[in-house]
Image (spheres, rainbow, N blue to C red):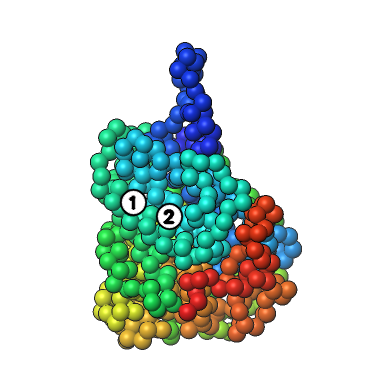
Amino acid sequence: MKALHIKVISILSLAALTMATSCKKYLDVNTDPNNPTAVSAANRLVGAITTTNGASMWRGSREIAGLVQYGTTQLNTGTNRNAEQWRYTASYFFWQNAYVYTMPNCVDLINLGETEGNPHFTGAGKTLLALNLGMLTDQYGSIVVNDFYNGVSGINLVPSFDDQQTAYQRIQTLLDEAIVAFDGTNKTAALNSKNGDILYQGDVSKWKRFAYALKARYLNHLTKKTALYNPAKVIEACENAFNADGMDAQFDYIAGALQTDESPWSSWGGFTSTTDPRYFTWSQFFVNMLTSFPVTNNIYQDPRIKKIMLPAASDGKYRGLRSGGALAGGQGILADGSNGDATKTAVADYGPFSKSGYYTNTTSPFPFITYSEVKLIEAEAKLRSGNIAGALTDYELGVKANMRKLEVSAPDINAYWTAQLGDGIASHFSNLTQGLSHIFRQKYITQCLNNETWVDMRRMDYSKDIYGPGLKKPLNINTTIFSSNDADPWIQGMVYETNEATRNPKNVGDNSEKTRLLTPLWWNQP
């Protein structure tokens, strides 16, 4: 990936199309070749990919990292604590970034592909648009699906909202249409003809598998919708999705260019402060995931911990804070549910969050969806279908794929799997809850910092039977909305952004924190 690609983030659709329609032939003599009045699909692809990552996914995931207890803050004052302690308000910018910057790029890419007779660009645009709609609806519930920018008519500043079921239907339609488009033939330009395909360098077969991977993800979210959930359809999508290493849909950051070319988890995303970075260290909850097995909670150090985290400078041990407690709260709840060492309140007692390993280094890639996730989705669908042997096989494939991605050695991978077998994993998969515990704890590890982890935790009702006794509500929780009792409701959705609520109150409806944060989304209701 070149630094130039990321600069295309500023190319916006409305300006390009408006300028294109306003030009007259008699003015062509004065046309500046360095300032084109029309932009081709080949030139728009990089912008759609880049904004899907930086404008949408990063904005959606940075607060989720605290909510699902990946990262913890150093201080119990200031705005950095808000996500961790569930103090969400309408000043949350994922909504605006997606609708203003990202999705117009996707829509224009679709339209340009159709106009030019180049269906591969249309397929890419529909795949990315489906991903953006999925991320939005999984955080907010009802969203604008049918009444937003379409690249042809004027923009409606007070759009109507569609319920989440409608959003999910549109996601599947877009992905089905994308898959058909990828089977077509481009007439005038190959997908990477302008070096804009920074995901797959023009490999259309991988784009098609990307679309199938997203189909599997969103079909699998419907496990509580008895009339709609079809594990056979999930498995079918998985079988057509990523089937080997090297296929992950991910955004690769680079070093040595502008700061915004580097991973936001390492620097510019709020991590430059030496006294109060956005996240100070990893949570003890995540440390537990990497130092114990599901179901038995027996201690075993996952070899990936050395790839993800740095140990404490004070004693070389891996430990984390309890979510919401900040540094003053000391070490959090351990894997067996007991309290950690509350005297560990020094900075040196914890390894840093930023620049600590695979997920937060300067060049760390940011995955949209991975081969590992596909195999773990397939494992869940097979387990729910009663195919225990198939579920265990796919589980093994998913876990080992992530380990290889993080460059764990083959002997360490084999030793880890042998230890899991010795801990009784084969018998655990004969029990639905225990099998799901293995699958979802591995998804928590392999989807590190991805928005999808919050979907998983809500689908599993924040269950200790799934995630272990170390899962507790955060300390200093927002008691205006939530109870500190783990048995009471946990956070379920996000507040709509201020701009939308102010401009479009009739369609937004009740945007109070109490309603928005506590109301389960459609797919999470029986």
Work out whether mark 2 precedes mark 1 in sequence or the reverse, and give the earlier one: 2
Answer yes or no: is residue 198 visible: no
Q: Is residue 111 left or right of residue 263?
A: left
Q: Which residue is mark 2?
A: 130
Q: Nearer the viewer, residue 513 or 169?
A: 169
The three-letter code of the residue at mark 2 reads Ala
Residue at image point 36% right, 44% down: 122
The three-letter code of the residue at mark 1 reads Ala
Q: Is residue 526 left or right of residue 155?
A: left
Q: Secondary structure at mark 1?
A: helix
Q: Position of residue 101 (x, y in %)?
A: 54, 44
Residue at image point 65% right, 83% down: 485
* Tag 2–tag 1 contact (CB < 8 Å): yes
Q: Which mark is residue 178?
A: 1
Q: Is residue 58 left or right of residue 73?
A: left
Q: Which mark is residue 439?
A: none
Residue at image point 38% right, 60% down: 172
